[in-house]
Structure formats: structure tokens, C-alpha cells
Amino acid sequence: MNRVFKIAPSILSADFARLGEEIRRIEKAGADLIHFDVMDGHFVPNISIGIPVLKSIRAITRLPLDAHLMISQPERYVAAFAEAGADSISVHTEACHDLSAIAAQIRKTGARASIAINPETDPDRVLACAGELDMILVMSVHPGFAGQGFISDSLDKIRAIRRDLERRKLDLDVEIDGGIKADNIADAAEAGANVFVSGSGIFGHPDYLEIVCRMRDQIAGI
């Protein structure tokens, strides 16, 4: 299956005092979508941003908004995030009892359904409902904090997921989130990921266009 590579800057690492300007800069840099991390202080220790911020971003960009809900009881908030403008919604395996039900709930809103797994989580549970999903998100850091180091074992998990999807002829996106930079994005692509979330790897660089182009160069031809 042909994989389309997508670069997804995570605005958790953006300058929130200049968020509108940051969005415009990543648009001009050629980002494919915007990754929007939501933390509740319960499922993960930190608290980040929520529905009002996503709604304000939706008003100023046409880029797809990729909402990553690192929250407990995500089923309570799926409809509100979709209504605010999320094009895809990821919820965590570890926070959901019935993955098929929440995938159907997400799709009913018109958003793309994605299930995320933490570094310590076996992928078998999410693979069991892969036919009901649009994307699987593999965390390559422990969720809740920006700027962590990349967990290299996540590449083996991505390989296993991609092999299983190809065996079953399921054409899903496989997203990787955590510690992705220009020097390891090719490893993630070769393992089978095609959506690359990068926070400090992009926003920590002075020239967003240059770093996004460098990332694309690294994965060209894979």
C-alpha cells in the first residue's frame, strides 16, 4: 500500500504568547496537519489546553486539526472536540473500556477515529479493532510532558503494527508521537510510521521551513 507521509507539528511546544503567528509559520513551512495535545491532570500529570483554544485555531487555519486526548473518560468530550473543529481524534487505549464503541462514537461526529497506545502497552488490543479505525497512534515517549527523549523500542512496536495491518490489507495511518526530530524521523518511517508528530523538533528550531524540509528530505524515497 502506498503510504503518504505527513508532518504534524505539535503546538504544545509552540510559543503560546504568539500562537496565531506560530500557526501561520508552520503553515508556510509546509506542515500537513496540526497536532493538538489535550491533558487533564488526571490521566497524565500535566494540564494543557482544551476546546476553546482548538476552536480559536480552527478559525484561523485550514490545516487538519489532530486532537490527541490524553484524558480520562474521553467519551464525555469527543463530540465537543469534533464540534470545535477537530478533524481527527485520538483517545488512549488505557483510558477506554470499549475501543470499538468509542471509535464508532468518534466516526459518528464526522472525525477520523484514532486509538493511541502508551510505551508500555501491548498493541494487540488496538489491533483487534483496527478495522474500525482510521489511525493508530504510537507514543514514543511517556505521555504528559513535552521535550522527552525518544524511546527506541517504539520502533519495534510500529513494525509489528504495520506488519499486521498489511497482512490484513488494512490501509490505516500509523502516527508516532514523542521525540521525533530530523535525525530519527527516517527510522520511524522505515519502521512503518507515516504521520510524524514533532514538537520541540520543529518549534525548537529557528527556521520552521528549513527543519520541515530537512525532515522531508530524510524520509524521501522510503
Image (cartoon, rainbow, N blue to C red):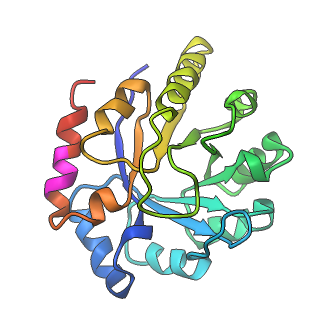
- Is 186 left, or right, of 157 in this rendering? left
Q: Is residue 78 above or below residue 84?
A: above
Residue 77 pos. (x, y %): 74, 68
Quarter of the figure with the C terminus: top left
Residue at horizontal 64%, vertical 68%? Answer: 81
| Residue projecting furthest to the top | 167
The mark total stands at 0
| Residue projecting furthest to the bottom | 17
Residue at horizontal 55%, vertical 41%? Answer: 138
Residue 105 pos. (x, y %): 77, 52
Q: Is residue 14 above or below residue 184?
A: below
Q: Main secondary structure of the magenta part?
A: helix
Residue at horizontal 69%, vertical 50%? Answer: 92
Q: Nearer the viewer, residue 222 or 120?
A: 120
Residue at horizontal 59%, vertical 73%? Answer: 84
For residue 80, which quarter of the picture?
bottom right
Q: Is residue 149 above or below residue 125?
A: below
Stretch of the chain drawn in magenta = 210-214
For residue 63, which quarter of the picture?
bottom left
Q: Nearer the viewer, residue 157 or 165?
A: 157
Residue 114: within the magenta?
no
- Is 193 left, or right, of 114 in this rendering? left
- Is 157 left, or right, of 97 in this rendering? left
Quarter of the figure with the N terminus: top left
For residue 194, which quarter of the picture?
top left
Residue 70 pos. (x, y %): 65, 60
